[in-house]
Amino acid sequence: MVAIVVSLFSVWFARRQASAAIDQSADAQRAADAAKDQAVSARDQAEIAAKQLTLDRTAFTESQQPYVVVDIRASDFISEALVLIVENVGPTVARNVRIRFNPPVQTSMDGDDGEKLADALIFTQGIPHLPPGRRIEALFDIGWQFFKKDLPRKYTVTVEADGPYGTVEPLTYLIDLEIYRKLRHLTIRTRHQQVQEIEKLRVAVEKVAQELARPRREAEAAEWQRVVAEQRKRTRRTTSTSAHDSLQSGTEEVGEGNGS
């Protein structure tokens, strides 16, 4: 009986130990799973941080790169004129700027002697450097002349340049000149034209002032002439009186001399 009791107790104790070992194993598995989850989460966070760092570096690099745009649009200062504009709107210097038009630019002003806008150095040799805010503007064509001829109206423009962090990503877009057909254009006056208008206004004001001052000048002139005439009359009277007195005095002296 004692052996049976001891055996039953041993079996019970072994089961308790086995159950405890199973519980410990489950706890260890759960701890391992949690550690694995933490490791996966840490890896995901590290990947996200690396991607964010890459995006930040890319954004910073792009923000420091030059941004050269080419456009053809209506002029603000010349009526009916279309102008070609090359401008660096970025924060840094653009170097080795290359501009390609497809098809090559054609205008009604291209000469028969071979001189064409497409042969300009900015297209054939490029622009060595273009500082921030620098703008190159050239006459492209006169609107009514351009639309009167059978010339390309759409151009695909590709702009390439080098910046402080290497080659800038090429910029390609479409320029459609057809949008300027039959549009009314408002011409903005330049500062020189404003000065000319002010000068015209000054001349007009001076003329009005002269017209307003004419009656006064005429009255002053008439008064001056009257004063001069009166002064002449007084002078004549004084001269006549003096001459009469001298003549009378001389007659009396002659009379006295005859009497003596």
Image: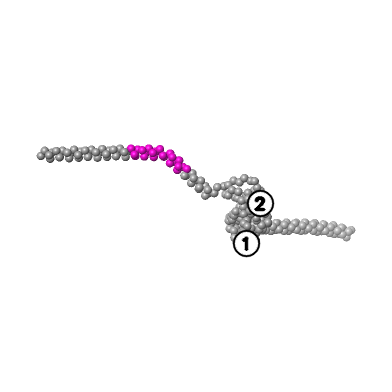
Residue 119: where, in percent of width, then height? Answer: 63, 59
Foreground of the two, 252 or 197? 252
**74, above or below 17, in the image:** above
The answer to the question of whether label 1 and label 2 lie on touching residues, with beta carbons closer than 8 A, is: no
Q: Nearer the viewer, residue 31 or 99?
A: 99
- Quadrant where the C terminus sits is top left
Secondary element under disc 2, as helix, strand or loop, is: loop
| Nearest to N terminus: mark 1 or mark 2 | 1
Quadrant the N terminus occupies: bottom right
Query: Is residue 209 one of those drawn in magenta?
Result: yes
Whole-number angstrom distance, CA of label 1 to CA of label 2: 28 Å
Which residue shows up at 24% across the image and 40% down it?
Answer: 239
Residue under label 2, please give it.
149
Q: Amino acid at mark 1?
A: Gln
Q: Residue tagged by mark 1?
A: 125
Q: Residues within 10 Å of mark 2 (few under 14, many from 20)?
A: few
At x 36% / y 38%, what residue is drawn? Answer: 222
Q: Amino acid at mark 2?
A: Lys
**Residue 218 on image: x %, y %:** 38, 39
Look at the image and give the residue range highlighted in magenta. Answer: 204-226
Q: Residue furthest left?
A: 260
Quarter of the rendering containing residue 28: bottom right
